[in-house]
Amino acid sequence: MMTVEKVWLQHYPKEIPHSIEYEERCLQDYLKQAATTYPNNVALHFLGKEMTYSEVYEQAKRFANQLKTLGVEKGDRVAIMLANSPQSIISYYGALMLGAIVVQTNPLYVERELSHQLIDSGAKVIICLDLVFPRVEKVRSKTDLTHVIVTSIKDYLPFPKNLLYPFVQKKNTGIKVDIVYDEKTIAFKSFLQKGDSSEVQVELNPSTDLALLQYTGGTTGPAKGVMLTHRNLVVNTTQCIHWTYKTKPGQEKMLAALPFFHVYGMTVIMNLAIMSGFTTVILPKFETKDVLKTIDKQKITLFPGAPTMYVALINDPNINDYDLSSIVACLSGAAALPLEVQQTFEKLSGGKLVEGYGLTETSPVAIANPIWGNRKSSSVGIPWPDTEATVISAETGETAEIGEVGEIAIRGPQVMKGYWNRPEETEKVFKDDWFLTGDMGYMDEDGYFYIVDRKKDMIIAGGFNIYPREIEEVLYEHEAIQETAVIGVPDEYRGETVKAFIVLKEGRKLSEKELEEFCRKHLAAFKVPRLFEFRDELPKTLVGKILRRVLVEEEKQKREKQKSSNE
């Protein structure tokens, strides 16, 4: 058993407790609490449409009761494939009220990714946008889905936007979806209106009953469902409340530009706002101009985001036309936050922007810099209350020395229960009760942690986790490709971008454009390689295993050479 000296506690601001007494409650209870405490407060603002906490709570209850009529019971999986919208929150909390387990699904997924997630989770019902319905329909017969509930952005738009939206959607996307509704394919709006608004009575144990299956890929093999209990999520949200101790319950305005289908946006925006009675100002997707306009007009005070968002904002040529001074705090995650970006954004807004660290398996936040306290540049910060972190030496398998690089391990009440139906995979990532993150880093003498590399080959581009093997498997399906290897290369905007090395079969020809088009048919847009390099051969071991690390090193040397020649 490893013992850890919590040297970081000396750097806690006096307002943050070292340990917290967590309520033994389920996540959906906090929506009821907010509706009781702040019934007339605006819970959601969505493109001009506002809903109070009492309205959101009533609709979530209606949704829960309607799911019950479809045969959904405690423990059943309910998939949600929605952009940020009132429907995504109503569906999420409504499913939890029934004791169902939510499966958050990225609307960008193509059929291959979607079918794996639905089959693996055994989801009975999916709530999806009309724009993605054709994809759901294509995989439906392979899954356990009994019902598909379809909604549209226009369902929660105010008049006359709701009437104009279909025309705008067709103009912007070129897509007009015609859906034939029946007993198995249901329109969200009418489905909800028929619902009973009485409370659903289900016995749940917060510590053992799952609230969420959040899929995360491995560097090898298919994506795994991370099992997060109600307690995991309640704990992490409560920790976040204490970390942002200057915020005022029932008074803040939270900007939801991060997607709720990502565990970071789900916890640090959706769940935090509801637990605190904040107003959530929802944007369906991140657009620089829309975000700047929203911060200015709505007087946003909290804006959790990813580094790419802050990069885009500070580089907008019209940023000085907007007033960002309402911002109090921003917590950045999902990728490294450049110091220059942090300093520039703080200067423009007057608010605090700090970096944090975590994984899907930690609900997700485990470590962060104090917002109003001692922060260190290049560091991801210090462990949150009741959270321990350590660095495991690759040489000894024990606690590493100060400053020694090793694998970061986390222990705390927000750490997952395990991987869905994968006991062997679960066993691999735990050492006693320590979760092995797979990230390499070190701790300094003050207990601040630094990430230096990833133990495996995962790529993080624009906040999305991308796994090389998955892209390679798609590329290998192309009849002209003999060998391929995929790596992440540094990118000033996205953090990293995907580069694919290709060896063609003898006598075959293939252009970068053809390759990109092929990838777009089989991969979500954020996974499509941005760079291609054709080679005669790839570096290999004696037994024929392709050496990705050699390619990474070659790219590094190439960039250093270019940099020195430009100086």
Image (cartoon, rainbow, N blue to C red):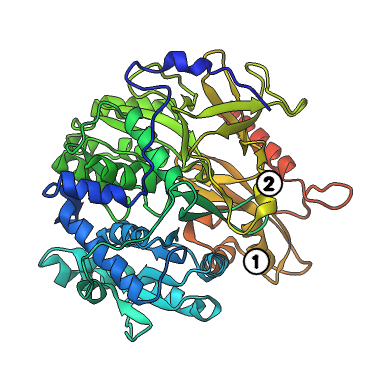
Up the image or down, 360 lies above or below 261; here it is above
Which image quadrant is residue 400 in?
top right
Residue labelled with disc 1: 510
Q: Which residue lies furthest to the right in this view?
A: 542
User: Along the line of sight, which residue is nearer the eye, 307 or 245?
Assistant: 245
Please identify the quadrant where the C terminus is shown.
top right
Front residue of 390 and 201: 201
Up-down: is 522 above or below 83? below
Residue 69 locus on image (x, y percent) = 33, 76
Left or right? Give the position of 232 relative to 404.
left
To which residue does mark 2 refer? 427
Label 1 residue SS? loop
Q: Which residue is drawn at 56% across and 13% down?
A: 445
Which quadrant does the N terminus fall into? top right
Q: How many marks?
A: 2
Which residue occupies the foreground of this view, 95 or 504?
95
Q: At x 53% / y 49%, what residue is drawn?
A: 465
Residue at 14%, 65% in the rendered image: 161
The amino acid beneath tag 1 is Leu
Using the numbered discs, state the Cα–Cα distance from disc 2 to disc 1 in whole angstroms.
Answer: 43 Å
The kind of residue on which mark 2 rests is Glu
The reply to whether dot 2 and dot 1 touch (C-beta < 8 Å) is no
Instruction: Compare marks 2 and 1 and give the one earlier in the sequence.
Output: 2
